[in-house]
Image: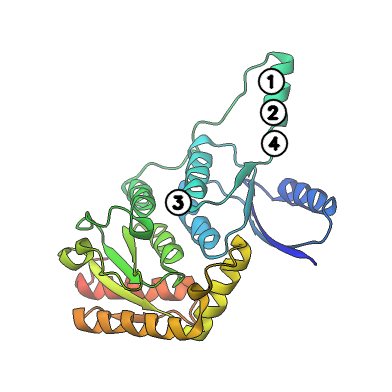
Amino acid sequence: MSTTVVLHLVSHASGELVEMLARTAVAQLAGVEVRRRLWKMVRHLDQVPEILGVVAATPGYVLHSVSHSDIRDALEEGCRHLGVPCHFALEPLVGQLSEYTGAAVLSHHSSGDVFDEDYFHRVEAMKFALAHDDGLASDDLDDADVVIVGVSRATKTPTCMYLASRGIKAANVPLVPGAAPPAGVLQANGPLVVGLTVDPSRLAMIRAARLTALRDEANRDYADLDALRKEVLEARRLFIRRGWPIIDASHRSIEQTASLIIDMLRKRAGGER
């Protein structure tokens, strides 16, 4: 029986190194099928949130060859937060050679981005999204531009990461069956609050795949279709009661969902954003 692994390959150049290493490594493994996603020419910090958004939507193993410390730190920190393994392609070789030769390890301390106002805005948005992911700091949402609310696996995290890559401070708050929404999201005055919904049948497939990936056979209710119908219905009722705009993400890409939210923010701000 084969195992399917998602490999996210991130390169500061053409990607040939990480692709070669990935192919060579996988060839040594029995019964492993690979789905690859390659990002080339990753040389700017504001590219990281979009990468993390895709990683969040399709978790797997991240292999990178990024040497600029600011981009590398942001990528690795984001992966740690998402619970996704992330490995620098030249480790442990660089460390072992350094130890053998006694030579110091050189690193590029900055990606050389132009540090203008827009740059810092995007960096702050990325930090905000990581600090307010999956209900974290849900009692402190007033500084958000948008708060995305929805059931588990409704693409909240990748949508927030994509919005962060556009300089938008996005938080996401999960709805837990049988539990009241966090008070912070009900009391937040500043941000736009958007409800994300997903077709229960599609959600059941996504959650079942997640359970399989986690090898969690005990938590059957998480992907039970009847339970999901009720969960999604209760979420929609909450959105309607609160007057929150609703986006059905069932057949939309992350970019399409984010685009709708950006349009809402523009209309809300009277064309400022």
**Quadrant of the frame with the N terminus:** bottom right
Q: Is residue 145 left or right of residue 60?
A: left
Mark 4 falls on what kind of element? loop
Locate residue 62, reporting x and y percent.
62, 51
Q: Earlier in the sequence, mark 3 or mark 2?
A: 3
The answer to whether marks 1 and 4 mark residues whose Cβ atoms lie closer than 8 Å is no
Q: Please say whether residue 10 is visible from this viewpoint.
A: no
Q: Which residue is mark 2?
A: 94
Q: Which residue is mark 1?
A: 98
Q: Mark 4: give few (<14), some (14-19) or many (20+) Cα within 10 Å.
A: some
Whole-Å distance between the Cαs marked 3 and 1? 31 Å
- Residue at the top extreme of this rendering: 102
Q: Earlier in the sequence, mark 1 or mark 4?
A: 4
Q: Mark 1: give few (<14), some (14-19) or many (20+) Cα within 10 Å.
A: some
* Residue type at tag 1: Ser
* Residue type at tag 2: Val
The answer to whether marks 2 and 1 mark residues whose Cβ atoms lie closer than 8 Å is yes
Locate residue 227, reporting x and y percent.
44, 82
Whether residue 71 is situated above or below residue 231 in the rendered picture: above
The residue at the point 53 percent across, 73 percent down is 220
Q: Mark 2: give few (<14), some (14-19) or many (20+) Cα within 10 Å.
A: some
Q: Please say whether residue 100 is visible from this viewpoint.
A: yes
Q: How many marks?
A: 4
Whole-Å distance between the Cαs marked 2 and 4? 6 Å
The residue at the point 56 percent across, 51 percent down is 84
Please give the label number shown on residue 90. Answer: 4
Q: Which residue is mark 3?
A: 46
